[in-house]
Image (spheres, rainbow, N blue to C red):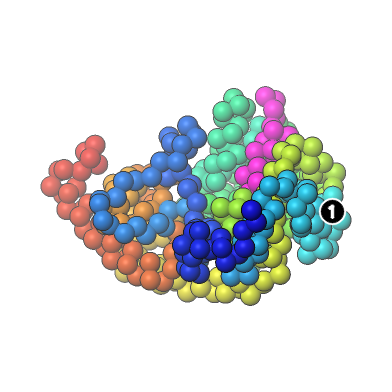
Amino acid sequence: MPVSRRGFLRLIGADGATHGAWLSARGLEAHFADAQAQGQRARPVLPPGVEEIRISSNENPLGPGRAVLDAMIGKFPEAGRYPFNASPTDSALVSALADRFRVKTDSIVLGAGSQEILKNAVRAWVTPEKSLVTSLPTFENCTNFAKRQKLPVAEVKVDSAMRLDVEAMIAAASKGDAGLVFFNNPNNPTATVHGGKTVADMVERIRKASPSTVILIDEAYHEYVTDPAYESAVPIALSTPNVLVARTFSKAYGLAGMRIGFAIGRAETLKPLAAMRMPYNVSAFGVVAAMTSLGDPMHVANERARNTDVRAFTMKALLEMGVKPADSQANFLFADVGMPAKDFREACAKQGVVVGRDFPPFEKTHCRISIGTMAEMQRAVEVFRSALKTTTTTAASGGAKGGR
């Protein structure tokens, strides 16, 4: 029996806030590296009755805009159709993205989030003879997948400012045995960014030293950057062989739960990714959500402004506590809390605030904190202050776990 929008909202208990939360961006990113490696979704256990503030997974705390929610709800009558039989089709989303970037459709490849793009890039260009060159720490998708396949990985530690060490990455990629360079800009978890000139110079030098090496620039947090030196690498990818950019609707667009990402570059560069794309990898709901999002630029602009304000508030509060975050150009912070992330995370969880998992090699000093709403962060910074005092007192009395 067909279900109307009003009827569906009644089924889920439906005021706008309820269905907004049900379809929101807040997914279940793994909070611990060991659980992630096993494909699990571990989360800390909060005390009974404690309300959760989840600032651990770099999600947009407000989720998609109202127009997107309405569009997704309107898709339920077509829930029984495959994406190529629903309206709009996944091909329509490719065309919409091609129009947005003024390219042909063969310069766009869709993914189930940008993660499918990243994994397929490893499949396409990393071999037992051709290594993955990446940063440490960075988004682990490429690294973990390559290691599970027992493929060679060269991890270059970030510099003292928590930025990707460009010179060291160029050196590692210029040895002639690099199949793929993964360059996360802004970088997750450190939230730092490199300017357009630096990225262009890096691409030129790697291309000159090793023309067959493919360079993947991940711009998942592109919309949040406020640094005037930053420039998207999309123009470079469209004009340069063996360069591609990955983007996602998971962050500023608020569609993490919908799993929509895409790669953009020259058709000949993307051909291996297109061949590896999983059939029906995007849902009818994700397609209509993404297309509606593209038609609502004010939602992203408002989200960017909101995040900028709340990020500044959070950074100021942390600095006043003596906690130094790296310069953030994303919707999260990487902060030197002066103790193991595990201890800080557990102390915060006792008061209902869930922060990020460990990120080696900085798991003994740094914690990643996502940016929630202003109300959430106002509450969270008080919990941070309490957690820092509690853990400092425990360590001073000799009771810190593991003797830390």
- Identify residue type, mark 1: Thr
Q: Nearer the viewer, residue 54 or 358?
A: 54
Left or right, 340 with respect to 180, comes to left
Q: Nearer the viewer, residue 145 or 294?
A: 294
Residue lying at the far front of the rendered structure = 1
What secondary structure is the magenta-colored segment mainly?
helix
The magenta segment: 111-130
Instruction: Inspect this view and state whether residue 336 appears.
Output: no
Q: Position of residue 249 (x, y in %)?
A: 63, 57
Q: Quadrant for residue 363, please give it.
A: top left
Magenta run includes residue 366: no
* Above or below, comparing residue 59 to residue 243 in the picture: below
Left or right, 195 with respect to 156, comes to right
Question: Which residue is at a point 53% across and 46% down the rendered structure image?
Answer: 138
Question: Which residue is at a point 75% across and 36% down the rendered structure image?
Answer: 276
Left or right, 180 with respect to 377, comes to right
Left or right, 197 with respect to 365, comes to right
* Above or below, comparing residue 225 to residue 126 in the picture: below
Magenta run includes residue 129: yes
Q: Nearer the viewer, residue 111 or 33?
A: 111
Instruction: Inspect this view and state whether residue 120 appears.
Output: yes
What is the secondary structure assignment of the residue under circle 1?
helix
Rendered-image quadrant of the C terminus: top left
Q: Which residue is mark 1?
A: 105
Q: Position of residue 15 (x, y in %)?
A: 48, 69
Q: Residues within 10 Å of mark 1 (few under 14, many from 20)?
A: some
Count of all numbered marks drawn on residues in the image: 1
Q: Quadrant for residue 132, please give it.
A: top right
Question: Which residue is at a point 84% across and 50% down the rendered structure image?
Answer: 106
Question: Which residue is at a point 38% across and 45% down the rendered structure image?
Answer: 43
Q: Position of residue 185 (x, y in %)?
A: 61, 55
Q: Position of residue 299 (x, y in %)?
A: 61, 72
